[in-house]
Amino acid sequence: MASHPINALLEEALDQPDIGTTGQFRWHATPVGIAALWIEPSPPSTPPFDSALKEGLKVGLDLSREEREFHQVSQGLVLLFHS
């Protein structure tokens, strides 16, 4: 069981088909918001929200007004955007 209930939801959602891939992220629609999974080989030193905002536009997602948080799950670093 994941240490945080939201992590379990995210891990399950990340196993589903994605809604697009950009340079640094794979994008997923999840029950708790839009998830951007970091796909670069090395982890960022700080959560790269600015990069995610720019890359989200490439898959038709304007996330600039959304709340944002980050989670570490078994698949890696996830930036979560939600209302």
Image (tube, rainbow, N blue to C red):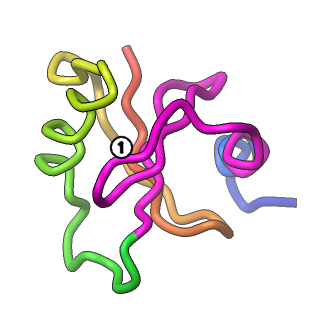
Residue at horizontal 47 percent and vertical 40 percent from the top: 27
Residue 38: percent from the left, percent from the top? 41, 62
Local SS, label 1: strand
Residue at horizontal 37 percent and vertical 14 percent from the top: 83
The residue stretch that appears in magenta: 11-39
Seen from this angle, which residue lies furthest bottom? Answer: 42
- Name the amino acid type tagged 1: Glu
Seen from this angle, which residue lies furthest right? Answer: 1
Q: Is 43 contained in the magenta span? A: no
Closer to us: 77 or 1: 77
In which image quadrant can residue 68 be found? Answer: top left
Residue at horizontal 22 percent and vertical 18 percent from the top: 62
Residue 11: percent from the left, percent from the top? 72, 51
Residue at horizontal 60 percent and vertical 38 percent from the top: 18
Above or below, 9 relative to 23: above
Residue 35: percent from the left, percent from the top? 48, 39
Circle 1 residue: 69
